[in-house]
Image (cartoon, rainbow, N blue to C red):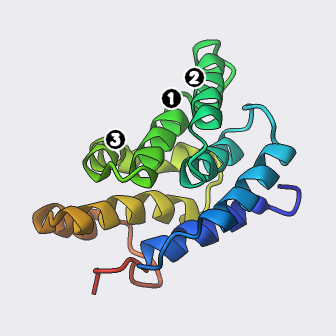
Amino acid sequence: MRTRSYDSVQFLWRWELAGNPRDPQRWKVVDTFAHGWLPRAGQSFPDMHVVLADAAADDEASLQTRLEQMEELERAGRYPQGGVVPAVSRGLAAYARGDYAGAIAQLTPLLDKTERLGGGSRAQFDLVEFTAMRACILLGRSDELARLLATRRHGPAKPAVAGVH
């Protein structure tokens, strides 16, 4: 991730949220690279991306290990963002596994806390919002999608999410 491989994770994830199919081989490459850069949890912003890569690459063992490490750091008071990053990570992982209802339940209560993710950019906030939106679309929850769209932070562009017009 020295070359900011979390950008690679975000690009691949956004590709899928825009309605494109998952490419398991690309995810495996990105996941391997992410673990080479950050083999153990300790930096909340990159950790979230490693969890996402683990989930999309279907590496459940690494995913659970990373989440446990993050939560251990949080319990010890050594994770500056507290429990927000592990909770968001669990929501993103639920989506990656196809548990869209679980993703919505986990992510939507955290949308007003995304500034605590540690990256600080609009791209990180959008990653969480767009994932929740896409889950609503996939489950046909149009009322919930409308609420998310109405309450989202306004930005320069419309959400790049398949099904949002």
Residue 114 vertical placement versus 44 (above, below): below
Q: Is residue 137 above or below residue 18?
A: above
Mark linked to residue 71 = 2
Q: CA distance from mark 1 to mark 3?
A: 12 Å
- Find residue 15 and report its horizontal and vertical position in percent: 53, 76
Label 2, label 1: how far apart the Cα atoms are: 7 Å
Mark toward the start of the polypeptide (3 vs 2)? 2
Under tag 3, what secondary structure? Answer: helix
Residues at marks 1 and 3 touching, judged by CB atoms closer than 8 Å: no
Q: Give whichever of 23, 85 is nearer the camera.
A: 23
Which residue: 85% across, 47% down?
Answer: 37
Question: In this view, which residue lies farthest toward the top?
Answer: 76
Query: Where is mark 3, residue-wise?
Result: 106
- Label located before the other in sequence (2 or 1): 2
In the image, farthest residue toward the front: 25
Residue 98 falls left or right of residue 141: right
**Gap in Å between the C-alphas at discs 3 and 2?**
16 Å
Mark 1 against mark 3, which lies toward the viewer?
Answer: 3
Taking the spot 54% from the left edge, 43% from the top edge, the residue there is: 116
Give the farthest residue toward the right.
Answer: 2
Amino acid type of disc 1?
Gly
Residue 114 x, y percent position in the rendering: 48, 49
Residue at the spot 45% in from the left edge and 53% down from the top edge: 96
**Residue type at tag 3:** Gln
Neighbours of disc 1 within 10 Å: few (<14), some (14-19), many (20+): some
Image marks 2 and 1: residues in contact by CB distance under 8 Å: yes
